[in-house]
Image (spheres, grey):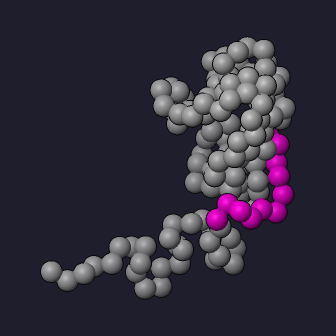
């Protein structure tokens, strides 16, 4: 049986191993950025810092040109994979945490307490 390269290894594939590309077709590793943005990409944006974020959770819409998301909260905060928060990551209080978000549409945040301050920013290319 002949070897068939994956789509990521095909000749003239410009996806750079599925990395999001900038306008020069250079793969972004998440380590580059031109500016930061402290609000999400909705018509009535959620701006940072958010004081007393709802205990039921908040959905942030990731800007189209964002590559990283950084968060810091005064309480433990859960970053959910979806709006159900059945799976996700718990970030301890007063801990700066960064995740790559170039291919995400939403980020789901849920604080452990109703009395909180959540600061966040997106790294923009």
- Please report the residue visible at 61 percent of the width from the left and 41 percent of the height from the top: 106
**For residue 41, which quarter of the picture?**
top right
- Please report the residue visible at 77 percent of the width from the left and 62 percent of the height from the top: 33
Q: Does the segment drawn in magenta span residue 37?
A: yes
- Please report the residue visible at 40 percent of the width from the left and 80 percent of the height from the top: 10
The dominant secondary structure in magenta is: loop
Give x and y (percent) for residue 81. 52, 36
Give x and y (percent) for residue 105. 60, 46
- The one of 105 and 76 positioned closer to us in this rendering: 76
The answer, for residue 51, to whether it is visible in the render is yes
Q: Does the segment drawn in magenta span residue 12?
A: no
Q: Give the vertical position of 63 relative to 7 (above or below).
A: above
**For residue 118, which quarter of the picture?**
top right
Q: Magenta segment range?
A: 29-40
Total label count?
0
Give x and y (percent) for residue 34. 82, 63
Residue lying furthest left in this view? 1
The answer, for residue 41, to whether it is visible in the render is no
- Please report the residue visible at 70 percent of the width from the left and 15 percent of the height from the top: 113
Residue lying furthest bottom in this view? 11
Which quadrant would the N terminus be assigned to in this image?
Answer: bottom left
Which quadrant would the C terminus be assigned to in this image?
Answer: bottom right
Give x and y (percent) for residue 65. 71, 57
């Amino acid at each position: 049986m002949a070897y068939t390269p994956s789509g990521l290894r095909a000749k003239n594939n410009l996806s750079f191993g599925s990395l999001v590309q900038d306008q020069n077709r250079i793969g972004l590793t998440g380590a580059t950025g031109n500016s930061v943005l402290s609000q999400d990409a909705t018509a009535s944006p959620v701006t940072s810092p958010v004081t007393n974020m709802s205990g039921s959770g908040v959905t942030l819409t990731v800007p189209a040109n964002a590559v990283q998301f950084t968060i810091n909260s005064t309480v433990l905060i859960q970053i959910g994979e979806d709006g159900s928060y059945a799976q996700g990551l718990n970030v301890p209080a007063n801990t700066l945490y960064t995740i790559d978000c170039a291919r995400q549409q939403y980020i789901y945040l849920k604080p452990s307490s109703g009395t909180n301050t959540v600061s966040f920013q997106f790294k923009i290319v």
